[in-house]
Image (cartoon, rainbow, N blue to C red):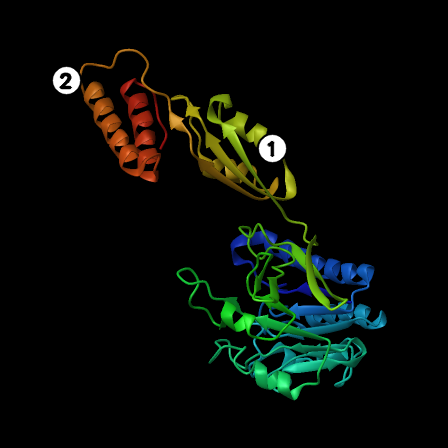
Amino acid sequence: MLRLLHTADVHLGARHADMGDAAVIQRERQFAAFKASIDLALAERVDIVLIAGDLFDSNVQPRRSVDRVAAELARLVAARIRAVLIPGTHDVYDRASVYRAYDLPSMAGSGGPTGLVTLLTPERPWVYIEALDTVIHGPVFATKRAPYSPLRDLPASIAASPGATWRIGLLHATVAIPGKVEQDEVIVTTSEIAGSGLDYLALGHWHSAQSARAGTVAFAYAGAPEPVAVDQDRAGKVLLVTLDDRDGRRSVDIAERVVGRTRFAKVDIDAATIASQPDLVAKLAARADADLVLDVRLTGIRSDDLDLEFSEIEAALKTSFLRLRLGDASITAPVVGALPPAETVAGAFIRDLGDRISALEAAQQGETAAAAELRDALRLGRLLLAGHEVTL
């Protein structure tokens, strides 16, 4: 049996320019998730920790950041747990690479070719771990964009390495999906994975955890252990991978474990239950959670008198959530009673917009963004024509 902890895309040192003052906090959350990953590896007594690229967000890192990573890897060394890592596309192994500037394995107390911490490079594309009878293949390039598939030369790499019970792949790449994902900096195909001869392929580059099979080869993305962006609702995890060979039957079991703090939630609120903007702010404030990315969608029928300014609501609740996102799927109340005469401004306005909304919904078989915009115009127009003051 072989037990692995698979992580990737930690992106330590990310600047998070879109987060303002919260950027420093988010960087610490990312490091905390990396530390939690090491904690889990120690608690589970895994055999190997795999880091499939983009441990750092860029090659420009202060010494303090590298020292903090080395200290975490040193905890694995002290427990005699091996770690194998590869550069990615953010911390690419070019001439300015952070891995050329700093000897991370030596800093972790495990230098040399037989050390417990191994960095795979273009010059060293695989490592044989004799005690575990395992070969880890990690083909990488010295450029951000790969000149060809990193799996192209895998047969030669396998031929040059010792025979072993287990063959593990470690790649920072995109799996091509015809019609959806066909271009990226590093591309591999499922047919290449199926023909690789690997038992497990540990992938980095996609920030959402997911797993699949290509032929007999199990492959997976661990995703980012802490979301790098607040729309990555499948991030926040690492993978515990167990490879077993019993009675000639080989199996690969992949289990997700949460290590990040960020959580995601979606909630629908019936617009009819909202009395005013302060009322909605109070309802949302009751859910306050600094670790929560909350998606709120208004639904149902909205009163003509309900005036909401989403930017003001988001500003009022800025410190209550990691991120609050508001969406509006509500519709205006239908006209009650007899319509104003068609020859009046109000009557012509209501009929014209009503007909246009109906035509859009019929053409698209349901509500569309254009129909929603016209509904809002109808609501505001009716308020104005009724003598109400409206703030735009």
Q: Position of residue 169 (x, y in %)?
A: 63, 73
Q: Position of residue 324 (x, y in %)?
A: 54, 41
Q: Amino acid at mark 2?
A: Glu
Q: Name the residue carrying label 2.
A: 343
Q: Callout 1: few (<14), some (14-19), or many (20+) C-alpha neighbours within 10 Å?
A: some
Q: Position of residue 275 (x, y in %)?
A: 49, 21
Residue contact at pointers 1 and 2, CB within 8 angstroms: no
Disc number for residue 285: 1
Q: Callout 2: few (<14), some (14-19), or many (20+) C-alpha neighbours within 10 Å?
A: few
Describe the element under mark 2 as helix, strand or loop: loop
The count of marks equals 2
Image point 63% across, 86% down: which residue? 159
Q: Position of residue 5 (x, y in %)?
A: 72, 64
The label nearer to you, 1 versus 2, is 2
Extreme residue in the top direction: 337
* Image quadrant in which you'd find residue 70: bottom right
Describe the element under mark 1 as helix, strand or loop: helix
Q: Earlier in the sequence, mark 1 or mark 2?
A: 1
Q: Amino acid at mark 1?
A: Ala
* Image quadrant in which you'd find residue 10: bottom right
Up-down relation of residue 88 to residue 276 (above or below): below
171 vs 275, nearest the viewer: 171
27 vs 161, nearest the viewer: 161
Q: Quadrant of the N terminus?
A: bottom right
For residue 283, say whether it is visible: yes
* Image quadrant in which you'd find residue 68: bottom right
Image point 42% across, 24% down: which residue? 301
